[in-house]
Amino acid sequence: MLKNMPAAAILEAVKDAYYDRSSLHSNIAGKITREFKRIKTTEDSLLHNFHIFAQLTPTELEVLELLMKDYTRQEICELRHVEHSTLKSQINSILKKFNKRSVQEIVPVLRELHIPEIISQRKRNLKDK
């Protein structure tokens, strides 16, 4: 039931509940449908991205993690002791696997799916073993 429902509709809903009949107001049904679609889309995206993650090399994962932490390409090169051309090649390989043209297309989606937190948790679990 919604707060703004007319008294007759509320009374009808109470009667339906009493007689063990379910009734969904169209507004509620619409909200539920939209939420299920949102969850399904997020789920599909998460599964798709996990599938891609399984294909990444340890080096690509490390580079991607640094990119998600907003390190610049120069900082990543210095931190990993690699040439800019090497990093460029690694990033291109990541982009190809995700079928994207830029890092800016990947990072926001991965953040929305909480991938950085998942990676950090996995690393902590591996260190604890």
Image: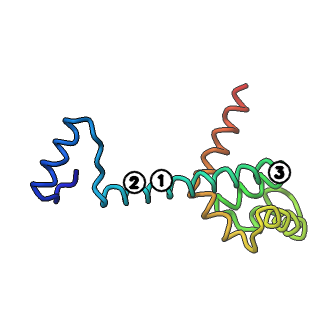
Instruction: Please name whichever residue, 15 or 76, is drawn nearer the observer in this view of the structure.
Output: 15
Residue 55 marker: 3
Residue at x 22%, y 36% (from the top left corner) = 19
- Say whether marks 1 and 2 touch (CB < 8 Å): yes
Residue at x 30%, y 51% (from the top left corner) = 24
User: What type is the residue that disc 3 sits on?
Assistant: Gln
* Label 2: element kind: helix
Residue 36 marker: 1
Residue at x 11%, y 54% (from the top left corner) = 8
Please identify the quarter of the rendering in which residue 21 is found: top left
Location of mark 2 (residue): 32
Could you tell me residue 2's position as x and y percent? 21, 54
> Mark 2, residues whose alpha carbon is within 10 Å: few (<14), some, or many (≥20)?
few
Judged left or right of residue 30, residue 105 is: right
Instruction: Please name whichever residue, 23 or 109, is drawn nearer the observer in this view of the structure.
Output: 23
Q: Is residue 46 above or below residue 101?
A: above
